[in-house]
Image (spheres, rainbow, N blue to C red):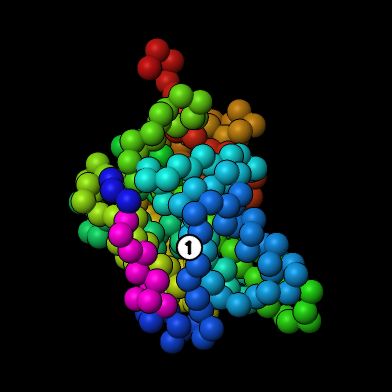
């Protein structure tokens, strides 16, 4: 995948600014983490809506503090920051996943799926991840500042040291540049976040179910519990049928993986 000749900042701004007044796009060559930077700004009182894109992150972060390695040309890493006051935060990472998956794989022909609570998978390999964070600014605003960090594999990467083998967008969209993909993903993502703020996760539940990679599969939780995944509920909670009965998981601190059968 080639270095993008453009990031389409003006087009993205024109599409988003009517819905997010004051919105801007920033592209940097290198940063520790786009999400860390936006969280720093928010805590210092800077809460303008912004898209921060990095060609390379030196300290990218995933869920549970795991590192997210990114390299120029082979990954797309960005964070969207905006003030938000939804009625309920539950299921936001799932709604974001639905939006990104539908933008990258309209109609589902490429088989892009979603793994609860915040990963994009293809053929049981990880294509990307989503990190949701919020900050309470120093100002007296009632709204928290939401930071959505997204990392996507554009091209091949080494599987060594990864818990899940990698997938990449170039497998089915080899000609798409990072800038073109960013332009396709961001405006619908803003729409999704604003719709979530008004109506919660329920309107996205069936769309998530269509791409749910865990539903109907044997899974294992981080505490060793095994069971059959029964999909997600209307609030974004994961439902797992275990020997002790139905277990409902709402905490993203619980890790869930497809169960590996003996001898597999």
Residue pictured at 32% horizontal, 56% vertical? 4
Residue 125 colored magenta? no
Q: Is residue 117 visible?
A: no
Tell me the element at label 1.
strand
Looking at the image, which is closer to me, 159 or 125? 159
Q: Quadrant of residue 216?
A: top left
Q: Would you name the residue on which mark 1 appears? A: 27
Taking 225 as reference, is 151 left or right? left
Vertical arrangement, residue 143 with respect to residue 217, above or below: below
Query: Viewed as shown, does residue 160 lie left or right of 42?
Result: left
Quarter of the figure that contains the C terminus: top left
Place of residue 192 in the rendered image (x, y in percent of width and height, measured from the top left) = 44, 71
Give the residue drawn at x 49%, y 48%: 56
Looking at the image, residue 105 sits to the left or right of residue 261; the answer is: left
- Which residue is found at the position 63% from the left and 63% from the top? 38
Quadrant location of the N terminus in the rendered image: top left
Asked whether residue 20 is in view, the answer is yes
How many C-alpha atoms fall within 10 Å of the one at disc 1: few (<14), some, or many (≥20)? some
Position of residue 180 measured from the top left corner of the image (x, y, whole percent):
30, 62
Which contiguous range is marked in magenta?
4-13
Residue 260 quadrant: top left
Q: Position of residue 237 (x, y in %)?
A: 55, 54
């Amino acid at each position: 995948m080639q270095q993008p000749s453009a990031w389409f900042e003006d087009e993205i701004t024109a599409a988003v600014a009517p819905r997010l007044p004051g919105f801007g796009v920033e592209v940097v060559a290198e940063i520790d983490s786009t999400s860390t930077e936006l969280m720093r700004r928010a805590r210092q009182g800077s809460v303008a809506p912004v898209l921060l894109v990095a060609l390379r992150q030196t300290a990218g972060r995933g869920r549970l503090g795991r590192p997210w390695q990114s390299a120029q040309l082979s990954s797309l890493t960005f964070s969207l920051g905006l003030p938000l006051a939804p009625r309920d935060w539950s299921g936001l990472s799932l709604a974001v996943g639905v939006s990104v998956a539908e933008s990258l794989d309209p109609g589902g022909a490429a088989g892009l799926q979603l793994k609860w609570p915040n990963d994009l998978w293809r053929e049981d390999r990880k294509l990307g991840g989503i990190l949701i964070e919020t900050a309470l600014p120093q100002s007296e605003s009632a709204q928290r500042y939401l930071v959505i960090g997204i990392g996507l594999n554009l091209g091949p990467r080494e599987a060594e040291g990864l818990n899940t083998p990698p997938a990449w967008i170039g497998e089915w969209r080899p000609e798409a540049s990072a800038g073109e993909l960013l332009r396709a993903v961001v405006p619908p993502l803003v729409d999704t976040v604003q719709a979530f703020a008004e109506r919660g996760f329920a309107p996205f539940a069936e769309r998530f179910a269509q791409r749910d990679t865990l539903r109907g599969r044997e899974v294992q939780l981080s505490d060793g519990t095994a069971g059959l995944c029964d999909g997600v509920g209307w609030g974004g909670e994961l439902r797992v049928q275990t020997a002790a009965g139905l277990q409902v998981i709402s905490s993203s601190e619980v890790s869930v993986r497809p169960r590996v059968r003996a001898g597999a």
